[in-house]
Image (tube, rainbow, N blue to C red):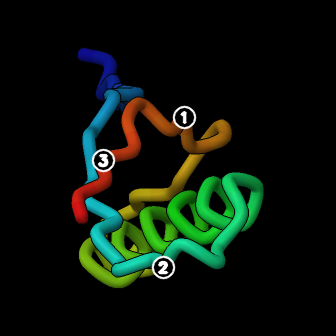
Amino acid sequence: MKNIHAKAKVQITVEVDAGAPWGAECTIEQLYKQAADTARSNLTNAFKPQVHGIRIVGEPKIIGIFTEE
């Protein structure tokens, strides 16, 4: 009988709160870059890719910016 081994990779989408406080002096360009960098860093730190085999593929997509006075 043959001994068959299979592996699978799954790509999923997750939503990450990148809730750093930005002031009025921050440009939209800075906000987008910093939010994406924060989300990427939070995921990398949370999942420890070297241990769990998880890595980030693709670019973060900013889906919302919320402001309040």
Image quadrant occupied by the C terminus: bottom left
Q: Is residue 43 above or below residue 2?
A: below
Q: Tag on residue 61?
A: 1
Residue type, mark 2 in image: Gly
Foreground of the two, 32 or 38:
32
As helix, strand or loop, the secondary structure at mark 2 comes to: loop
Q: Tag on residue 49?
A: none
Residue in the picture at 40% in, 61% down = 53
Q: Residues within 10 Å of mark 3 (few under 14, many from 20)?
A: few
**Residue 51 visible from this viewpoint:** no
Q: Is residue 22 left or right of residue 30?
A: left
Residue annotated with mark 2 = 23
The answer to whether marks 2 and 1 mark residues whose Cβ atoms lie closer than 8 Å is no
Q: Is residue 66 left or right of residue 33?
A: left
Along the polypeptide, which appears first: circle 3 or circle 2? 2
Q: Position of residue 34 (x, y in %)?
A: 60, 70
Foreground of the two, 51 or 63:
63
Q: Position of residue 32 (x, y in %)?
A: 63, 54
Residue in the picture at 33% in, 29% down = 13
Residue type, mark 3 in image: Phe
In this view, the mark in front (2 or 1):
2
Q: Is residue 61 above or below residue 2?
A: below
Residue type, mark 1 in image: Lys
Q: Is residue 18 above or below residue 51?
A: above
**Residue 48 visible from this viewpoint:** yes
Q: Is residue 35 left or right of residue 69?
A: right
Image quadrant occupied by the N terminus: top left
Residue annotated with mark 3 = 66
How many angstroms separate mark 3 from mark 2 (CA)?
Answer: 12 Å
Residue in the picture at 33% in, 24% down = 4
Q: Residues within 10 Å of mark 2 (few under 14, many from 20)?
A: few
Along the polypeptide, which appears first: circle 1 or circle 3? 1
